[in-house]
DNA sequence: ATCCTACAATGGACAATGTCTAAGTCAAGC
DNA sequence: GCTTGACTTAGACATTGTCCATTGTAGGAT
């Protein structure tokens, strides 16, 4: 995590309390938070931090490739701090819980040229959906 | 089209002008429209249709499995009328254009039991990202 | 053909999420 | 310790989606 702060400083980031707090929140829990959840936790550490700043900072982290945006199906985007190890997601259709998963094989290779329509394909995101043990029990 | 309307009637749907219009809009263009885009086109055919009705109808079509919700990464969900042939999506990161694609292989089989965490996995959605020919040219 | 009634549509308020701006603040280099 | 431009703030605004009370109507019953 100081890793993260180091990398950011190296990229010319001005280090402010707000940015540090956002980075800490993301790094602290390896869950997938929405922007407003990040904001709520950030307020816990730095009460006067504003929502706009959290949104801005998250956007910057995403452009820098330090954090991934995940669009599962909920309304809000979620932010995934685990950006440096490729992985995919398993989502509970009922409660929305998200787990990181690592399927075997390379889905990118499964898309033949004839199905690429002239796109240069750079990335693939796989979302498995199902029911988690908790919801299945209920 | 009439296929769709037939199926819906068979399922006990009450056939109203509004529902017919929404079905027509979805069936008419095999693109992936947002709810508000569907509404806009529906208004063209039936000016007094309300936004709530379009949202309701889309929700019903989704529960019936006639239409798929697609969460690519834009803010709004998109609706995919091509629900009866399994397929995935190729999205242009710049302009947001979406194409249906058919990768080879079965990604569901690529998720080993050890990576399922007790979930019963029922579905998988694959989103390829890249740059479309138009945006690459620009 | 007309009536009934449950189901559907309406519109407008509300909620959730995200974006923008103008003005104030501060980190970091000098 | 200054200065400066990047950063933050608060809140207005925009977009997307949901809810509810009221009104309308499709389709079966008569």
Image: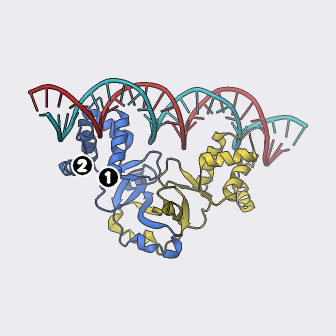
Chain colours: A yellow, B blue, C red, D cyan
Residue placed under numbered mark 1 in the picture = B64
- CA separation in Å, label 1 and label 2: 9 Å
Q: Chain of mark 2?
A: B
**Side (left or right) of A38 relative to D28:** right
Asked whether residue B37 is in view, the answer is no
The mark total stands at 2
Q: Position of residue A119 (x, y in %)?
A: 39, 60
Q: Which mark is residue A72?
A: none
Q: Mark 1 or mark 2: which comes first in sequence?
A: 2
Asked whether residue B101 is in view, the answer is yes
Vertical position of residue B132 compared to residue B111: above or below:
above
Q: Which mark is residue B8?
A: 2
Q: Position of residue B137 (x, y in %)?
A: 40, 53
Q: Under tag 2, what secondary structure? A: helix
Q: Nearer the viewer, residue C25 or A118?
A: C25
Dot 2 crowding, Cα within 10 Å, few <14, some 14–19, many 20+: some
Q: Residue at x 28, y 41 (%)?
A: B22
Q: Position of residue B108 (x, y in %)?
A: 42, 70
- Labelled pair 1, 2 in contact (Cβ < 8 Å): yes
**Side (left or right) of B49 relative to A64:** left
Vertical position of residue B70 compared to residue B102: above or below:
above
Q: Nearer the viewer, residue A137 or B97?
A: A137
Residue C25 picture quarter:
top right
Q: Chain of mark 1?
A: B
């Amino acid at each position: 995590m100081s890793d993260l702060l180091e990398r950011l400083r190296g990229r010319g980031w001005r280090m402010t309390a707000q940015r540090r707090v956002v980075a800490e929140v993301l790094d602290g829990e390896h869950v997938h938070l929405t922007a407003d959840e990040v904001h709520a936790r950030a307020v816990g550490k730095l009460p006067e931090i504003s929502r706009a700043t959290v949104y801005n900072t998250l956007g910057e982290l995403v452009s820098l490739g330090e954090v991934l945006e995940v669009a599962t199906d909920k309304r809000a985007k979620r932010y995934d701090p685990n950006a440096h190890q490729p992985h995919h997601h398993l989502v509970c259709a009922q409660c929305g819980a998200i787990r990181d998963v690592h399927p075997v094989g390379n889905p990118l290779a499964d898309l033949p040229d004839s199905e690429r329509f002239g796109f240069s394909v750079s990335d693939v995101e796989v979302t498995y959906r199902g029911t988690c043990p908790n919801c299945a029990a209920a």
